């Protein structure tokens, strides 16, 4: 009986991540195809990816940049739209933009002997009349949500490890392996 349970759990660890990832990718393909009302499976996803690449390529054109600035001005001035647009844009830029924000992993001392891992998002909060304080994003385990804490600079210790590894460690509840920055560079 012990053998059955052990192998069932081992199989579960292998099957569930593969099945869930496959299902989510399948759903993305199907929903994009349905949204574009296409009959060929995957065509909508391919068109969406090609369109995003094309927009990225033409965004360097002078006239397109002017149009994008105008569009951004409109989106950043409309009351409700501004909140949604700015949040989404800032979040995307934090992960993939030129101004990556989650590139400074740190350990924050909460109390004596208790620390948590996070990422510095603002290293000077003087503009909020909070000199000596910094903003640290603390992601939640098993979630892409998190919280922002403001802490004294001296309670934060920089970590010389790969940011993606720290994020994986926190989101996985501490079970993922952290790699050094040198290991991460060697892998890429």
Image: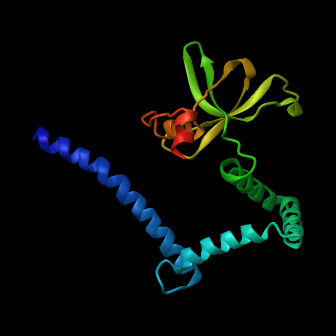
Residue at 65% of width from left, 49% of height from top? 95
Residue at 55% of width from left, 47% of height from top? 188
Question: Residue lying furthest front in this view?
Answer: 186
Q: Position of residue 66 (x, y in %)?
A: 90, 68
Q: Position of residue 34 (x, y in %)?
A: 53, 80
Q: Position of residue 30 (x, y in %)?
A: 48, 75
The answer to whether residue 46 is left or right of residue 153 is: left
Above-or-below relation of 138 to 20: above
Using the rendered view, name the quadrant where residue 137 is placed: top right
Looking at the picture, the colour scheme in use is: rainbow
Question: Residue lying furthest bottom in this view?
Answer: 39
Using the rendered view, name the quadrant where residue 108 is placed: top right
Viewer-proximal residue among 25 and 96:
96
Viewer-proximal residue among 174 and 57:
57
Question: Residue lying furthest top in this view?
Answer: 112
Above-or-below relation of 57 to 104: below
Viewer-proximal residue among 152 and 61:
61
The answer to whether residue 66 is left or right of residue 161 is: right
Which quadrant holds the N terminus?
A: top left
Residue at 68% of width from left, 54% of height from top? 92
Above-or-below relation of 83 to 137: below
Residue at 49% of width from left, 87% of height from top? 39
Q: How many marks?
A: 0
The answer to whether residue 92 is left or right of residue 185 is: right
Above-or-below relation of 78 to 17: below
Q: Position of residue 93 (x, y in %)?
A: 72, 52
Using the rendered view, name the quadrant where residue 36 is placed: bottom right
């Amino acid at each position: 009986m012990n053998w059955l349970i052990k192998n069932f759990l081992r199989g579960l660890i292998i099957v569930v991540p593969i099945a869930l990832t496959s299902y989510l990718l399948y759903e993305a393909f199907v929903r994009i195809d349905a949204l574009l009302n296409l009959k060929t499976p995957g065509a909508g996803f391919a068109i969406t990816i090609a369109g995003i690449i094309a927009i990225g390529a033409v965004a360097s054109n002078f006239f397109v940049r002017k149009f994008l600035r105008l569009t951004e001005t409109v989106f950043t001035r409309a009351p409700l739209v501004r909140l949604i647009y700015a949040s989404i844009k800032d979040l995307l830029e934090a992960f993939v933009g030129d101004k990556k924000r989650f590139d400074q992993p740190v350990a924050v001392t909460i109390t004596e002997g208790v620390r948590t891992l996070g990422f510095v998002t603002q290293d000077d909060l003087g503009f909020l009349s909070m000199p000596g304080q910094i903003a640290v994003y603390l992601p939640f385990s098993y979630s892409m949500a998190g919280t922002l804490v403001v802490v004294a600079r001296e309670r934060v210790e920089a970590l010389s490890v790969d940011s993606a590894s720290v994020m994986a460690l926190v989101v996985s509840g501490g079970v993922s392996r952290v790699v050094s920055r040198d290991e991460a560079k060697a892998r890429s």
